Every structure is written in structure tokens, then in C-alpha cells.
Amino acid sequence: MNAELIAVGTELLLGGTANLDAQIISEKLSELGINVYYHTVVGDNDARVKAAVEIAKSRADIIITTGGLGPTYDDMTKQTVAAAFGKELVRFADEEKRLRDWFSAPGYKFTENNLRQADFPEGCTILANPIGTAPGCAFESGGKHVVMLPGPPRECSRMLYEQAVPYLKKISGVGEIVSRNIHIYGMGESAVEDKLRDYMLELTNPTLAPYAKTGEVQLRVTAKAATREEAEKMMTPVIERVKAVLGDVIYGIDVKSLENAALLALKAKNLTLSSAESVTGGLIAKRLTDIPGSSAVFKGGVVSYSDEAKIALLGVSADTLDKYGAVSSETAREMALGAKAKLGTDFAVATTGNAGPDGEPLGLVYVAIATPDGNADVRELKMGHWDRDRIRTMAAHQAFDLVLKAAR
Amino acid sequence: MNAELIAVGTELLLGGTANLDAQIISEKLSELGINVYYHTVVGDNDARVKAAVEIAKSRADIIITTGGLGPTYDDMTKQTVAAAFGKELVRFADEEKRLRDWFSAPGYKFTENNLRQADFPEGCTILANPIGTAPGCAFESGGKHVVMLPGPPRECSRMLYEQAVPYLKKISGVGEIVSRNIHIYGMGESAVEDKLRDYMLELTNPTLAPYAKTGEVQLRVTAKAATREEAEKMMTPVIERVKAVLGDVIYGIDVKSLENAALLALKAKNLTLSSAESVTGGLIAKRLTDIPGSSAVFKGGVVSYSDEAKIALLGVSADTLDKYGAVSSETAREMALGAKAKLGTDFAVATTGNAGPDGEPLGLVYVAIATPDGNADVRELKMGHWDRDRIRTMAAHQAFDLVLKAAR
């Protein structure tokens, strides 16, 4: 079966936001083994939405729309799509009741136009929206399947995972599809592909496919089977083979990110971490504290964006700054040791460098880790060919990689 | 004139990345007053790219493609699009020379397939790519205009701004189009619209349109005129009217973000800033140091993710933590005063709170600012209905808003 996505919303055509829903849905359909051949974005215009649906009908087995399910006059997806399939919208009594209940809460005001969110194509399956007023729906007509999801990415992704995926599994008759992500740091996508190309081509179920992220690579293993257990079992030898080929550039399976893997590694040994950031300016702390529960491991950090801060908050010596400069291996080492001492943690990471746009040498960065034995290791990075964002991101990656390797 | 975008790349259909190029180009075309009616994403498949181009040809005056300009076999955009317009690809001698020069640099290896990047539709205009090997191109055929840009967003945006925009201005005969962005914080999109709806509807040139971002609203004023000066002059009364209607929720014109506005306000008065972050965990420092040149104002900060860090690095009193708890107005105040004193800055901001997922009361946040007179102001926020990311983002917004208001 193949699917195609239609996002309805003029704001997408004005560049107010990227089509994140398409990414979220495509990633999930890829896991389900459903091919996606086209994405379309169209504005809140009845004729143009209709034209987009007609084209999709002629090409796809499954049409998934996002957006245009709300209460206002420019929310027209349900009526336009239903009409394209010769269906009427009818009011669903349960949904009307739910809406009236929702708006009876203190602080809410019910207006009649909200009832448009209780109107759906006759005979459809309602997809509940636990975090918004607009439910989605799904129906089949003439051998084509239609699934309508809300536009806001939070609502879209939740409805997709909880409601649409079971529906899609059923209609595509795929049984259970299970994926595992192998996370790789320290080897580029083309090198990973070189080492595994023949094996990837040879595999059909499970499949093995690479995805590049900034500075990282993921390999996704996907198996289809009658049961979840069977699918898991089929993946094990593939993961083992990949581990044998790639070795220790693999930093985890299904761990989300380098910072997650680093936190988990420390947590497992009941170890703590702090940070001292210059060039990354808080990015390391921010990425660690993005993770719920990080406070069990990460105790805090210092953003020392001036020599004075390095001296006052981290105890870096003025002599070191004078003699070697703020961007030096020596300063990075003293920053890491200073954070470890001040915050009383087992490990501390530090960064110092120049991410531009001015100053010389551009892209020179030192990343240090202070370890429980009282020593510190420093890595030197030369990233003069990259821009400010990427230099900062890669410096933070390196810090997490140092933690991971030290915590093992 | 109306345009439509076709992104070519199987990775987009697999959900590896969102279609950022479409957002970048749409935003720019909207500024130019060129309507965009559709975006399409299609994979690296000759027949499907051809089908997408044929559909776009039947609907649009301008077709802008992104991606598929590289040297490998699955880079097929130029040849497929050229064929759809009955054109042949020919080798451009200047481009061949440029490529051979590029690959003669140390560390590069020339392979013959790279010469595919010197092949273009006959008679086209080359769009230079200063940061990559694949140039773009533009041509006109039978009254339709085609512009081809590279896929990587950095390359795409730079070629768009530097090369494609002048080309599009010429072919659409629009003269000069100039936009100004009015940035609003502290009033929701619907309230802004309520106050300005009639005025927005009445305007035709300049136009006035709202855009919502997380916790913020932007109003974009766009004027078309024969000269830039004339367009600027036409916008002045519109901006004045909006200022008169909305008052001090406007925090700047063309300032990019709250943190940019806050930094600029401090820089103008030669004032400095530091931070003490608990709930935001480095996000404030990270957003400030994302801005090139921020070190002139922002001297550093502390991420105090534990009581110990609050005491050791900021001098918060153990009594205060005992009596009022870490999430309290009193702790926020002492954190701000502590950062100001430790880092010797004119202002300091602090955040403490609970962004979840556990703990009570969820979403309670205190944001404080320490001011040059030695006092501190604290704001209490209740955001229990939001998720962790949004709570942290909004807490940082509030901190920047406090700085802005204090620095004025």
C-alpha cells in the first residue's frame, strides 16, 4: 500500500512554519512499511484543497490530511474531503456532548461554531483528541482510505501514535512492525554505508536503513512479523552483526540522543555530572535539562562567557588565562576541574573555543572532562569550515561523547 | 504571478527531515508578494518527479525546485525538469572549469560524475553556489519560469537570497518590495487580530499580516513601490498606527527575537547581564549566546540544578531554601541577586520552578530580575496546562521581557 500526505493551511504557504506533521507522519509510515510517494501542502481554499484531493485519489491507496479540522470558517478539510468521496457531513451526538462538556469548564465560553467539530463524514471512525477540541476521523471509500489529523504537531503526533497507527496497521494487514534504532557517533554516514551496503541490500525482513542527523548517524532495523516477540527475535542477529561491524562507534540502541545515553550511563552507576561552558554558552546544560528527571545526575553548571566569570565561578587561574588564553587546552582543563570541585560532582565537562563570527582561529574548540580520579582529559577540535550553530552543536556532542566513554 | 514549490528527495518522504527549504522560500516569496498555492515533495524517482512537474506546469507561473542537483545517479532534477520543458542538458564550460578547480584543492579527489554538476538546460541562467559544488539555474519556457535550487537549507537559502530573489524580482516586475516585522510579546494573536482586523482588511499596499510564534506574535508590514525609499515611506504611517493601537506590547521592529531585543537594549546603554537558571537549565544562556557578539553584554551564568549549587555558586541561603523551598519567590530573588554579585553585572535574571513531568505544583515558575539599584523584582507564572518544553520556553521569554522592560 502507498500513502500520500496533504497538509491544509495557508500559514504553511506563507512560510510561518515548516510542515513538521509531514515529517512526523512519514517517519512513522516508514516504520510501518507503508510507502509515501508525495507530500502536498495547500492553502485554506476549497477549490485548491479539492484539486489536491482529486490528484491524491488518483495515485494513492491511503490519503492522510493534516490541519483544517477546527471551528472557524477557514477550517474546511472535512467537508471538502468528504465531498470528494461523495459523502455528507453529519453531526455525531457523542462528539456534540463531549464538546458541550469541554466548554462547560470554568473560563471557557461555548459558541455555536464549535459544533462544526462534531460534524464528520457519515460512517467514519472518530479519532479522539485528548489534548484539543478537534477530533480526527478515518473512513474507507471505493478501496481508498482517508485519515484526517489535526494541524498542531503536538495534537497530530499524539493522535497518530495512539489512534491512527492501530487503524493503519489493521487496514494494511501488516501484523506487528517493530523498529530499533542503532545510534552511532564518530563515523560519518558514507563510512557507515560503505561498511554495511552489501548487508543492507541483502536484507528484506528485517530491513536496515541509515539516517543522518547533525554529526550523528542512526541505523534503523525494522521487522514485520505476526507477533511483537517474533519481530524482536528477528532483529537480534541484525543488531549483533551491525555491532560486530561498527564496534564502539555505536553508543546505544533506542536511546534518543547522545545526552540521553550519557545521562543513563551515569545514572546506572549513581554518578553525577556538572558543566562549565564557554563556547557552548549553556547548550550542554540546556540539552541535559531538556530530559525529564535529569536532576538526579546533572547538578548544575557555569556559563563562563568572560574571563572574570572563569576566575570568579570556576577558579581558573588568571595566570593560565594570561599565558595560554581563554581558548586553550589548559583553560579547558581548569574549567572542568573547577566545575567538578565547586559543584561536588563525580564528572564535569567543559568547553572553550571560538564559534565566530569574529576572532581567530575560528572554529578552534577545546572540550575537557574532569574524572573521579581528579584528572582531566582534553580534546582539541578544528571546525573552521562550519558555522556558529554547527560548531556549538558539535562541541556539545563531543562533551557528551567524552562522558559516555568515561562512564563506561 | 503565482509560484509552486517542488522538493525532490526521498529522505523527506522517509521523515528524515522536515521540508525547511519550503518554509524559507515561502517566507521570501510572501515578502515579494508572489502567491504560493502548493508545495509538493516527491522522491528521487524520474517518473514521479516528471508527474509532479507536469501538474505544477498546469497550475503555476513559476516553479521552484529544491534538491537533486548533486553528482550522483539519484540526482535527477535538472534532467527531468528540462525534459518536461522540451530542453536538453548541455555542459557549461565555465562550470566545468570551476569544478575542476574546486577539486584540485588539497584533500579533494575529482571523479568524472562530478561533471554532471556542470550540465544545465540549454540557455539557462546559472545561479552560483559559493558554499557547495552544485550550482542552481533558472530559465523561461513558454511563459513559465523555472528556478532550481540545491537541497541543503544553508545552500538553498543563500542562493535564494543572493541569486534567485533578484531574478524573481525582475521577472515578476514588482519593483521594490520591502517588509518590516513588528514584534509583540504579552498579547495573544487573537487579541492582536481583534484590535487590528478592520485596519488589516482596509489595507492593500502596504499590507499588514499577523504571524504567531511560541508565546509571541509578529505583524509583517509589506509595501511595494518603484524604489526602496518610497516603500519605506509608505510603511511609516502603518507602523505608527499599529504602535498607537497596541502600545508597549510591541518590543521592537525587525529585532529577530526577545533575546535580541534585550541584548540590544542593554548594549545601547553599555550595561551587562548575567543569569541564574534552575527550571530553564541553561536555555536563557544558550539563547543569549546563540547571538553573535553577545559576549559584550552577557558575562555568564549559573545553572543551579540542585540546592547545593544554589548555595555554593549563588550564595542562596540554606534558610531560605528550607523555609520557602527551591521553587519560591524568595529563592528566585536570592538567585538573581547572587548572580549579579558573583558576576559583577548590572542586571541578572533568575528562574526557578517545576516544569514536570513530576512534582507539585506542576508549572509553577518564578522569574526574577536583579537591577542596578540592588533590588530584585519577581514574577510568578502558573503554567500547569503546558508541557515541559513550553514551560521552559515561556519562562525564558519572561526573563527576556523583564530585561527589556528594565533596560528601557
Image (cartoon, coloured by chain):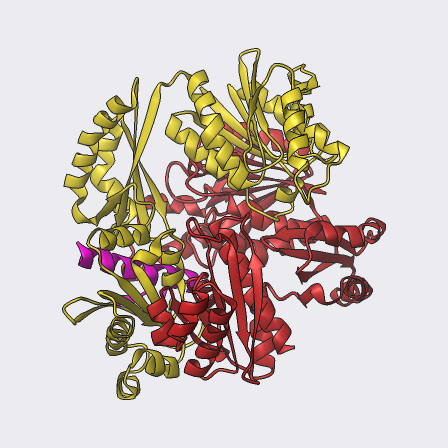
Chain colours: A yellow, B red
Tell me, yes or no, if residue A288 can be seen here: yes
Q: Identify whether A204 is placed above or below B398.
A: above
Q: Residue at horizontal 35%, vertical 45%?
A: A212
Quarter-of-image position of residue B267 = bottom right
Q: Quadrant of the C terminus of chain A?
A: bottom left
Q: Is residue A75 left or right of residue B201?
A: left
Relative to residue A151, is residue A148 depicted above or below? above
Q: Is residue B43 visible?
A: no
User: Residue A269, position in %: x, y?
Assistant: 19, 54
Left-right relation of B125 to A35: right
Q: Main secondary structure of the magenta part?
A: helix
Residues A351 and B324: in front is: B324
Question: Is residue B306 a member of the stretch shown in magenta?
Answer: no
Q: Residue at x 36, y 67 (%)?
A: B307
Image x and y of residue B353, in percent: 47, 60
**Residue A407 falls within the magenta-colored stretch:** yes
Is residue B237 shown above or below B370?
Answer: above
Q: Residue at x 22, y 59 (%)?
A: A271
* Residue A362, quarter of the rendered image: bottom left
| Quadrant occupied by the N terminus of chain A | top left
Q: Position of residue B76 (x, y in %)?
A: 45, 36
Q: Quadrant of residue A100?
A: top right
Q: Which residues are magenta?
A: A380-408
Residue B372 falls left or right of residue A236: right
- How many discs mark residues in the rendered view? 0
Residue B126 rendering spot, x and y as whole percentages? 54, 51
